[in-house]
Image (cartoon, rainbow, N blue to C red):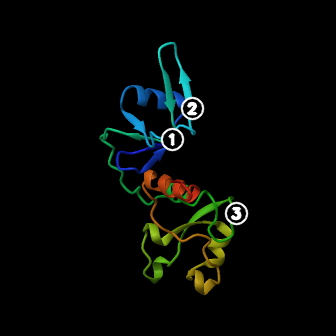
Amino acid sequence: MVFSKNYLPMSRIDIKRAIALLVTGKAEPLDATKTDSGWFVRSPSIVLHVPEHIRLTMTGNERLWKVPPVNRREILRRDHHKCQYCGSSKRLTIDHILPRSKGGTHTWDNVAAACERCNSLKGDRTPEEAKMPLRTPAKAPLHPVVAFAEQFWRDHQDFE
């Protein structure tokens, strides 16, 4: 597991990449006193401890990430190619949660993937009026590193 210089979990890497980062000085063990976790890599001249968690020592010029445009491909990606009303993955369309005829906008928090059947059943009504609640609330996608960090901390709540 690689953490940024400010301790934000960034990604999982394989042991070869971790060794390269440690040997070149681009990363350091997150907890140098713990040698009971991780791996020991032996060569004729050195024994290198590769811990489970490393922290980058340099800051990279990370690309600026912008919220993607609201389009069919990105909406389907966000909603995992599933209807947000029934869970179907067949014949998906884009539904405006608050219909445009009632003042709804074409923004991340007002669009969702919906199968043709659910979109037709909901029609020109809100989900409450149609008694068709959304499975997950509509919101803009998160920065990939932030999404990864949130999932990491959810999975490792007992991490010390």
Real-space Cα distance between discs 1 and 3? 48 Å
Question: Mark 1 vs mark 2: which is more N-terminal?
Answer: 1
Number of callouts in the render? 3
Q: Given contact means CB atoms under 8 Å apart, are the residues at marks 1 and 3 in contact? A: no
Q: Amino acid at mark 1?
A: Lys
Q: Residue at x 45, y 66 (%)?
A: 108
Real-space Cα distance between discs 1 and 2? 11 Å
Residue 88 horizontal side relative to residue 94, left or right: right
Q: Amino acid at mark 3?
A: Ser
Residue 21 horizontal side relative to residue 114, left or right: left
Res. 57 image quadrant: top left
Q: Is residue 71 above or below residue 32?
A: below
Q: Amino acid at mark 2?
A: Trp
- The residue where tag 3 is placed is 88
Where is residue 18? Give x, y as percent: 48, 32
Where is residue 69? Give x, y as percent: 41, 57
Real-space Cα distance between discs 3 and 2? 44 Å
Where is residue 140? Give x, y as percent: 45, 64
Label for residue 113?
Answer: none
Mark in the foreground, 3 or 2: 2
Residue furthest front in the image: 33
Mark in the foreground, 1 or 3: 1
- The residue where tag 1 is placed is 34
Question: Mark 1 vs mark 3: which is more N-terminal?
Answer: 1
Q: Given contact means CB atoms under 8 Å apart, are the residues at marks 3 and 2 in contact? A: no
Where is residue 43? Give x, y as percent: 52, 16
Q: Residue at x 54, y 33 (%)?
A: 14
- The residue where tag 2 is placed is 39
